[in-house]
Image: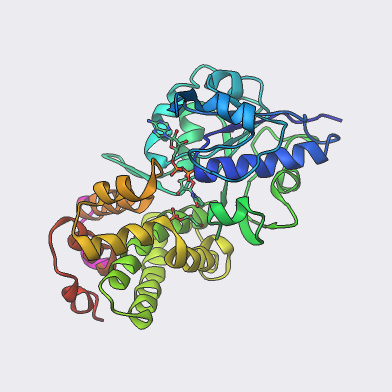
Amino acid sequence: NKRFRVGVIGSGNWGTAVAKIVAENCLEKPYLFHRDVKMWVREEEVSDMKLTDIINSYHENVKYLPEVTLPFNLFAEPDIRKVADGADLLVINLPHQFLGSVCDQMKGIDFSKSSAISCLKGINVSADGVELLHDVVEKKLGLHCGVLSGANIASEVARERWSETTIAFPLPSWYQQGDADENLIKELFYRPYFHVQVSDDVCGASISGALKNVVALGAGLVEGAGWGDNAKAAVMRRGLLEMIKFGNVFFPGKCRPETFTTESAGVADLITSCAGGRNVKVGRAFARTGKPLEVIEKELLNGQSAQGIITGREVMELLTATKKEDEFPLLGAIYDIVHNKLHISNLPERIAD
Ligand code: NAD
Ligand code: 13P
């Protein structure tokens, strides 16, 4: 039977936590996977040492996932092509603003019989409209790509505290018995502390994961303004409705509302992100200090990224270009508060029915 070689592209907070999961499974399931897993690390110096050397010597990503021991069969590799070339399964996991340039670094590799899972949360907006990130991977690299998204704060998952996730992996057109399918993908990610629900709604899982980051920023704003839990719940409820609507308007017929309301990738991710994620922290700090979001991100996150900042801008660009601002009043109000000096006291009126 074929054994699959797994590579991980990305080694941030979530990138490293997911690499730990797949390396544990590759170690435990030699009948399915090659034991050793390479993880692409964008090289940088930390305390006068290369981050790759630190990870390979001490089995810890001291910068992006400190105090978590990584499996010995996970290897940090600074050359992305050495990770991607020859991998049957690629796990792609980066802040989404870097996806295009990272894909460019893998150009020319033959991925015609490989598959990928995107763990990114975001969308890609350009003059041509909006694209989902697994589609970007497919188009740029000819690499068949599914999606993993869920209520998964990385630091908790890395400490093996139980959570659920949603995976959507449609079969590739070239699929034959023995190639990667959703069961194999589940084998790669399932852990006793990381439960996997398989779904066929790639679009719903992707949009949910992207937009909840912007809603979490909004939840942080009302929290930082000292408005309390009722206001935060209202932002979450209205946010969920706008997430579902976004799917219907921009991807008609392609995603199911139940994904948003019943899956880990939907409402559960919204709840956990609005409770303890990075975006809510950034929104909270903005309400308290008024500093630009990028400054707050730098001060609070030590090189990590709060994706709601960029996604919020991309969403607004799309809504403006398509003249649909009025249909998404919460997303518009969050944007105006953080970029256009709208005072938060205007929020209830702006989103009133
Ligand atoms: P992160 O926010 O920790 O970002 C740091 C990573 O970005 C580092 O690996 C760094 O090398 C890389 N980076 C910085 N500049 C770069 C560049 N120019 N080119 C390429 N890479 C660069 O990343 P993360 O937490 O692993 O997030 C990856 C994705 O996972 C995001 O879409 C995020 O929304 C999603 N996600 C995150 C969490 C979480 O709790 N962290 C949970 C679920 C999903
Ligand atoms: P933050 O990026 O806001 O930390 O959210 C992490 C996440 O996606 C949890 O599922």
Observer-nearest of 134 and 296: 296
Q: Tell me if I can see residue 257 in this picture.
A: no
Residue 57 on the magenta span: no
Model colouring: rainbow
* Image position of 262 (left or right of 100): right
Q: Residue at x 21, y 61 (%)?
A: 289
Q: Position of residue 42 (x, y in %)?
A: 47, 27
Residue 325 on the magenta span: yes
Among the 4 quarters of the image, the one containing residue 113: top right
In this view, 293 is above or below 5: below
Q: Tell me if I can see residue 313 in this picture.
A: yes
Among the 4 quarters of the image, the one containing residue 337: bottom left
Q: Position of residue 62 (x, y in %)?
A: 52, 38
Q: Residue at x 53, y 22 (%)?
A: 78
Classify the position of the N terminus by image quarter. top right
Q: Position of residue 52 (x, y in %)?
A: 55, 25
Q: Residue at x 53, y 44 (%)?
A: 65
In the image, the segment drawn in magenta is 321-328
* Image position of 315 (left or right of 71): left
